[in-house]
Image (tube, rainbow, N blue to C red):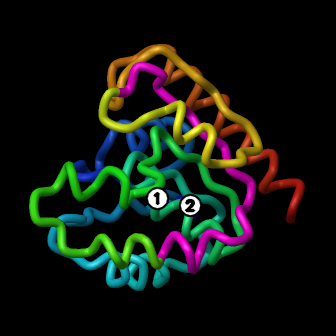
Amino acid sequence: MILNLHGLNGSAYNTNYKLLLEMYSKDMIVSPQIDYVITSPIEILERLRGYKNVNYIVGNSFGGFFAYVLSNIYNIPCLLVNPCIPPNRYIPSLVEGYAYTDELINLMEDYTFHPQPIYMILGMDDTVLSPVYTEQLLKVTEIWKINGGHSLSGNQQFYSVFSKAVEKVKLYENICK
């Protein structure tokens, strides 16, 4: 099973989900709708931990943060697309009155100690999150830097790279079985 996590104010049926549907049957993909603004990150994490038999996780933006944490908990690879890491750097300025900054900091400290294989796609023209900072912060197995901003919907280069990245994750997953 593939767990797909959308970004802040995003949709469970995001671009990543649609691209995954081109590669997998619908019953192989779980893509929950998450209200990141009003739900505690700890509660979100607990809900996501309820998914069993996850082979890998795809996370976009704020969902990328949760994908990163869950990859360590599950001991499985993840594919991050313009991940919001560290979220405490960005979310308080994106969400007025955000009440859970301390929880984000604690989750970063508690669950990101043994990074699993991380594959990452960065839109190098992202003006919401700093791709340069993210690249420096995370040690990744493989990274694809592409033209484009924070939203990569409609970006043909992204579509091509996403397919290649999923193949790399699947290859890693098959080696580990």
Position of residue 101 relative to residue 11, above or below, is: below
Quadrant containing the C terminus is bottom right
Mark 1 vs 2: CB contact within 8 A: yes
Please state the total of marks drawn on the protein image.
Answer: 2
Does the segment drawn in magenta span residue 108? Answer: yes
Q: Is residue 90 visible?
A: yes
Q: Is residue 51 left or right of residue 154?
A: right
Identify the amino acid type marked 1.
Answer: Phe
Q: Which mark is residue 68?
A: 2
Position of residue 7 relative to residue 53, above or below, is: above
Q: What's the magenta region?
A: 107-126
Label 1 element class: helix
Position of residue 45 relative to residue 96, above or below, is: below
Residue at x 52% of width, y 38% of height: 133
Residue 154: where, in percent of width, then height? 33, 19
Q: Which residue lies under the disc numbered 1?
A: 65
Quadrant containing the N terminus is bottom right
Q: Is residue 101 left or right of residue 66?
A: left
Label 2 element class: helix
